[in-house]
Amino acid sequence: MYPDGVRCPACADAVLDKEGNCRTCGGVWLDEERVEAQAPLAYTGGAYSERHCPACDETMDEPRIYDVPVDRCAAHGIWFDKAELEEVLRRSRGDAPAPVPEPSPADSLNMLIDAVRIWRREP
Ligand SMILES: [Zn+2]
Ligand SMILES: [Zn+2]
């Protein structure tokens, strides 16, 4: 399905196997149809990825699937980093998203102090 020699979009030197797996970083490159067969895609926004499509070398989009940012070439497929694929599959099963740690009060205070310092430097 995939020709030999497709470069991993995440690793400089790694080459994907025929199934689209990178043995170096554990990421996987999948056809959009294959992803949709596993889990309905829920694009909830998007930005541009800094990565390039391994098939056409165009800059990829960065849509979110189950709020996990992935890299996507509309023509060729979707790249999942190892942790991203696991998280998408986990969320597709309806598990609660991994909790995002709230900034502690000390962090918030330091952020405020930094903000004030930046503000004071302005003319
Ligand atoms: Zn890789
Ligand atoms: Zn492409």
Image (tube, grey):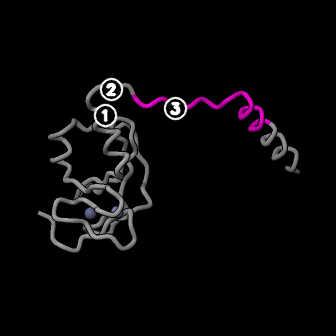
Q: Amino acid at mark 3?
A: Val
Q: Residue furthest left?
A: 1
Looking at the picture, does residue 56 appear above or below residue 87? below
Residue at the (40%, 40%) spot, across then down: 45
Q: Tell me the number on the disc at residue 95.
A: 2
Q: Where does the N terminus fall, quadrant-wise? A: bottom left
Q: Tell me residue 27's x, y (percent).
A: 31, 55
Element class at badge 3:
loop
The residue at the point 43 percent across, 31 percent down is 98
- Earlier in the chain: of badge 3 and badge 2, it is 2
Where in the figure is residue 47, as x and y percent of width and height? Answer: 43, 49
First in sequence: mark 3 vs mark 1 = 1
Q: Which residues are magenta?
A: 97-112
Give SS at disc 2.
Answer: loop
| CA separation in Å, label 2 and label 1 | 6 Å
Residue at image mark 3: 100
Q: What residue sits right under mark 1 in the picture?
A: 90
